[in-house]
Each structure stands twice: as C-alpha cells, then as structure tokens.
Amino acid sequence: MMESPTYEILKELFGKDYLEKGLQQGLQKGLQQGIQQGIQQGYRKSLLDVLEFKFKTIPEKLLKTINDITDTDTLSKLHHYAMECDSITEFKERMLGVLVEKLKTEN
C-alpha cells in the first residue's frame, strides 16, 4: 500500500504507533457517532410513522421540530405520547411540555 506524503511526514514527526493509535481512535469515534445517528433516525422514523398513521398528515412545523430533536430519550417519550394522544393538537401540547421540561433541566 502506498502511503501519502502527509502520512509519511506525520509518521516521521510522531512515530507510526502514535499515528495508528490516533487513526484507530478516530475510526472508533466515527463508528460510535454513526451508530448513535442510526438509533436517532430509528426513533424519529417510528415516531413519525405513528403520527402519520393516526393523524394522516403531519404539519410541516411539527415535522421540522421533530427532525431537530437528537435526544433518543425525548424521541422515545414522544413516540409513547403519539400512541396515547387522540389528536395532533394534544400531541403538540404534550411535546411542548417535554421540550420545556428538557430545557429546564439543561439550564
């Protein structure tokens, strides 16, 4: 395998073991981030599927808000609420309560 000139320079400066360890750590971190994003997407899709099934359409503003949520616990809680609520208005009210409570605990 042919090494890049940049890799060769870094290898001379820091040593091969150091670079390989850094590469391994970078790959591991990237893999963990990819797994986390996949989990978030799964929770989000489940939530949106329930809302669409129950209420036929999802208002654009609500869709954007849900797509901006990255916390899997919040998405999971909203999924449960979506199954319990009888209207999209009730769901939005409960979602607002969850998001306000989350903001309070973060500050």
Image: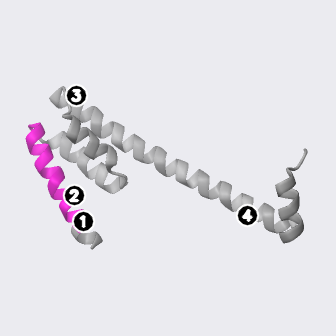
Residue 84 as seen in the image, left or right of residue 77:
left
How is the protein colored in the picture? one colour
Residue at mark 3 to residue at mark 1: CA–CA distance: 29 Å
Q: Which residues are magenta?
A: 86-103
Q: Position of residue 35 (x, y in %)?
A: 52, 49
Judge whether residue 27 is colored magenta: no
User: Which class describes the residues within 10 Å of circle 1: few (<14), some (14-19), or many (20+)?
Assistant: few
Name the quarter where the C terminus is drawn. Answer: bottom left
Residue to which mark 4 is pinned:
22
Which residue occupies the extreme top position in the image? 56
Please tell me whether mark 3 sits on a helix, a strand or a loop: helix
Residue at mark 2 to residue at mark 4: CA–CA distance: 38 Å
Q: Earlier in the sequence, mark 2 or mark 4?
A: 4
Residue at mark 2 to residue at mark 3: CA–CA distance: 23 Å
Q: Position of residue 39 (x, y in %)?
A: 44, 46
Quick one: 11 or 42, which is closer to the camera? 11
Residue to which mark 1 is pinned:
103
User: Which class describes the residues within 10 Å of circle 3: few (<14), some (14-19), or many (20+)?
Assistant: few
* Residue at image point 73% right, 58% down: 23
Residue to which mark 3 is pinned:
53
**Where residue 99 is drawn, which disc sits there?**
2
Amino acid type at circle 2 is: Leu
Q: Position of residue 105 (x, y in %)?
A: 25, 71
Amino acid type at circle 4 is: Gly
